[in-house]
Image (cartoon, rainbow, N blue to C red):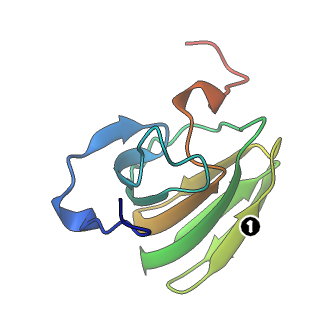
Amino acid sequence: MKNYYIEQLDELESAQCPCGTTRRAFTTPDNPVATIHMVDISKDSRTHYHKKLTEIYLILEGEGHMELDGELVPVKPMTSVFIKPGCRHRAVGKMRIVNIPIPAFDPDDEWFDDVE
């Protein structure tokens, strides 16, 4: 077994997420450490939070805002945002980001205050 992984983000299958559309790399059962996601933010991204995950966002393309615990913070390419567990957040505006969840992404750790 190799001591590294390589994935081509732009070739991975996309999936819907609260922020828009994501491509997730390194999401294997033997990797509990961290994952990396390329996310195309949609206009109707949903405010959500995580109880265990810390996330690091890196804005690649586009401009807009990050809503962080109700505060709107302007972002543009190369802005990085460190989001601690419990912080209600969403991206506002058409953007492409890289998201690094630590520990590895767990779909059961996405929480919403609103009920649909």
Q: Secondary structure at mark 1?
A: strand
Residue marked by disc 1: 82
Outermost residue on the front side: it is: 1
Is 19 left or right of 112, judged from the image as shown? left
Looking at the rendered structure, the kind of residue marked 1 is Phe
The residue lying at 43 percent from left, 38 percent from top is 17
Is 7 left or right of 44, judged from the image as shown? left
Res 49 visible: yes
Specify the quadrant that holds the C terminus.
top right
Specify the quadrant that holds the N terminus.
bottom left
The residue lying at 41 percent from left, 69 percent from top is 4
Q: Quadrant of residue 84?
A: bottom right
Q: Position of residue 28 (x, y in %)?
A: 41, 43
Q: Quadrant of residue 113?
A: top right
Q: Position of residue 22 (x, y in %)?
A: 36, 50
The residue lying at 31 percent from left, 69 percent from top is 6
Q: Please, is residue 26 above or below residue 28 in the view?
A: below
The residue lying at 16 percent from left, 61 percent from top is 11
